[in-house]
Image (cartoon, rainbow, N blue to C red):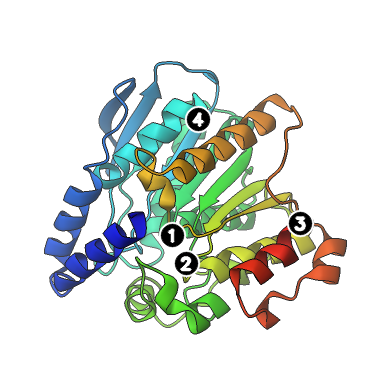
Amino acid sequence: MAVFFLRKLRNRAFKLIDNLEDFRKDKEKVFASVRCPRSVKITNFELNGVKAAWFHPSNGRHPNQVVLYLHGGGYTSGSIKSHGGLIGKMAKETGITHLAINYRLAPEHPFPAGLDDAINAYQWLLEEEHYHPQDIIIMGDSAGGGLTLSTLLKLKAEKQPQPLAAVVISPWTDLTMSGDSALNQPERDPILTVPKASEWAGWYGGDDLKNPLVSPLYGDLKGLPPILVQVGTEEILLSDSVRFAMKAALTDVDVSLDIWDDMPHVWHFFWQYVPESKAAIQKVVDYLDEKIEGVELPQPVKLSKRRLLKQLSYDSLQLGKAVLKKRILG
């Protein structure tokens, strides 16, 4: 049912795609129908010229921590309003206050505008709100997931302290669209298409799509903080997650790869209707509880050098769901 709805939504959206302003407004209207939980208080404000919002959960299980949330939308759309329902749900379930920003979008504001806004928000948390780096988690979905990873690489390049951890949902890590899932199974994705994603990639990254701060898959990942990667098998960006997690593990990053069978791009949005959405969000909750409290909890998929080298050569896989899951989950 969710997949059928998503295909209908994509067809409707793409009818408006030639008018970017209409496309953004329609997408925001549709996605904003997923309401923020009532127990989460939203406070809108301006952060150094960028629209921002606090999402304060009433339970506040982790009052000393904060999540910087970077929304998705192909670097060309999306906003606090469109993602408010998802961000609010994450804040409620994790018990952590979330900060969301409307980072600047392409094509009006190509790279590095969005990245600069993300770095600015992180520094604001450190300098103005006096959070310790180990009390900050950066989280994002889709392009926001890629932007999360680019933010980590930028912090590393500038020798700034890394956050406690990062959580990325269906992250866009390779804007060249060269992964097997994009090349060999694009029809399985009910939301994204390769031609449209490639167009957005050009708007954002220009001619240098292999720049690690545009496509974090091509970066030096050594020294990054713990990262949870969640992705569904019905995505053209499946390869982006698997290849990134493999590369991160090979550079000794504490990375957990969580693959969900039959799930589409950022299925978490459907937490009101789809059991797997709630279950995936609970995995995020458990993961952050472990990182904050230092309690060992069951991990989704832990990738090690030995296991990767022995069992995985992702680009040679045929991407059948059963084959892929057997290889990764063992």
> Which residue was labeled with disc 3?
303
Instruction: Give yes or no for contact between labels 1 and 2 (Cβ–Cβ under 8 Å).
Output: yes
For the N terminus, give its image quadrant. Answer: bottom left
Q: Which residue is drawn at 39% across and 40% down?
A: 271
CA gap, disc 1 and disc 2: 6 Å
Instruction: Give yes or no for contact between labels 1 and 4 (Cβ–Cβ under 8 Å).
Output: no
Instruction: Establish if 197 lies above or below 273.
Output: below
Report x, y in % for residue 281: 50, 39
Which callout, 1 or 3, points at the residue further toward the start of the chain? 1
> Which residue was labeled with disc 2?
235
Q: Nearer the viewer, mark 3 or mark 2?
A: 2
Helix, strand or loop at mark 4: strand
Is 234 positioned to the left or the right of 12 in the image?
right
> Which residue was labeled with disc 1?
264
CA gap, disc 1 and disc 3: 23 Å
Q: Residue at x 50, y 30 (%)?
A: 66
Which callout, 4 or 3, points at the residue further toward the start of the chain? 4
CA gap, disc 4 and disc 3: 27 Å
> Which residue was labeled with disc 4?
66
